[in-house]
């Protein structure tokens, strides 16, 4: 149980294009989803938290106009990297948790984004 | 500032050895402490600890939390090559936010 699917797993695109990443909870309802970024040999850094039907809450230093997050249903959240540039190249990971105080976050397999 | 510190950063052992991974934290409004295993892709959930002194166990892995001293340990007995991974400790605050440590890289050789 508690499977989170993230798609695509790998994206290569030209500078200036926008890239959408999907995160789905397959066997549970995710009232809250999280988006992280991970640089090589570093730990996960939270970018934003989204609750179903609400606007996302972004961490300090994360541009909300650059990283658009939508959480329109209890099983799907999307992250769109707009006008991507080489410095946006990174490993992006989503997680999802169901309602309740003591529910762990379950992670997707991540998306490796490479901007040329 | 909230922080989670893991030690050692790296560990190399032989199959059959027992290892102990450490995690200390300073987090405002603590809710729970979680351990994850990260291999090539994203982290997989191992344990969630909320109360002091109660050991969580799953096969050869076990973990315990000390909320007074603000630390947790993860034990792996009779290690196998498949245990090689980065083990992440994360503390969840009441805000739902997870604060991760930098991880311990464990390498198990035959």
Image (cartoon, helix red, strand yellow):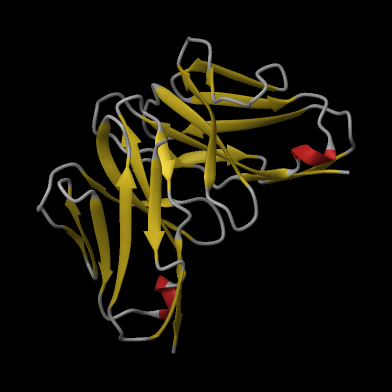
Does A62 appear above or below B52?
above
Instruction: Give residue A4's position: percent from left, percent from top.
Output: 47, 39
Residue found at x 16% / y 51%: B66
Q: Extreme left residue here?
A: B53
Q: Is residue B75 left or right of residue A65?
A: left
Number of numbered discs visible in the structure rendering: 0
User: The N terminus of chain A lies in which quarter of the figure?
Assistant: top left
Does B34 appear above or below B55?
above
Residue A92 visible, this orientation = yes
Residue found at x 59% / y 45%: A110
User: The C terminus of chain A lies in which quarter of the figure?
Assistant: top right
Q: Using the image as rendered, state which of residue A2 and residue A114 is in the foreground.
A: A114
Q: Is residue A81 left or right of residue B43?
A: right
**Quarter of the figure with residue A83:** top right
Q: Extreme front residue here?
A: B1
Residue A3 visible, this orientation = no
**Quarter of the figure with residue A89:** top right
């Amino acid at each position: 149980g508690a499977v989170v699917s993230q798609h695509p797993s790998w994206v290569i695109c030209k500078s200036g294009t926008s890239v959408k990443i999907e995160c789905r909870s397959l066997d549970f309802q995710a009232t809250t989803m999280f988006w992280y970024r991970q640089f090589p040999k570093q730990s996960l850094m939270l970018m934003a938290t989204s609750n179903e039907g609400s606007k996302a809450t972004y961490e300090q230093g994360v541009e909300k106009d650059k990283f658009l997050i939508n959480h329109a249903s209890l099983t799907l959240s999307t992250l769109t990297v707009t006008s991507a540039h080489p410095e946006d190249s990174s490993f992006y990971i989503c997680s999802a948790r169901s309602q309740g105080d003591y529910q762990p976050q379950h992670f997707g397999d991540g998306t490796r984004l490479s901007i040329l | 500032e909230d922080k989670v510190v893991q030690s050692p950063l790296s560990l190399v052992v032989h199959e059959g050895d027992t290892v102990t991974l450490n995690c200390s934290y300073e987090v405002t409004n603590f809710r729970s402490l979680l351990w994850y295993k990260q291999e090539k892709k994203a982290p997989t959930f191992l344990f969630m600890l909320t109360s002091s002194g109660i050991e969580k166990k799953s096969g050869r892995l076990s973990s315990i939390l000390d909320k007074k001293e603000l630390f947790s340990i993860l034990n792996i007995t009779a290690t196998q090559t498949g245990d090689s991974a980065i083990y992440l400790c994360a503390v969840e605050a009441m805000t739902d936010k997870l604060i991760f440590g930098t991880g311990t890289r464990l390498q198990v050789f035959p």
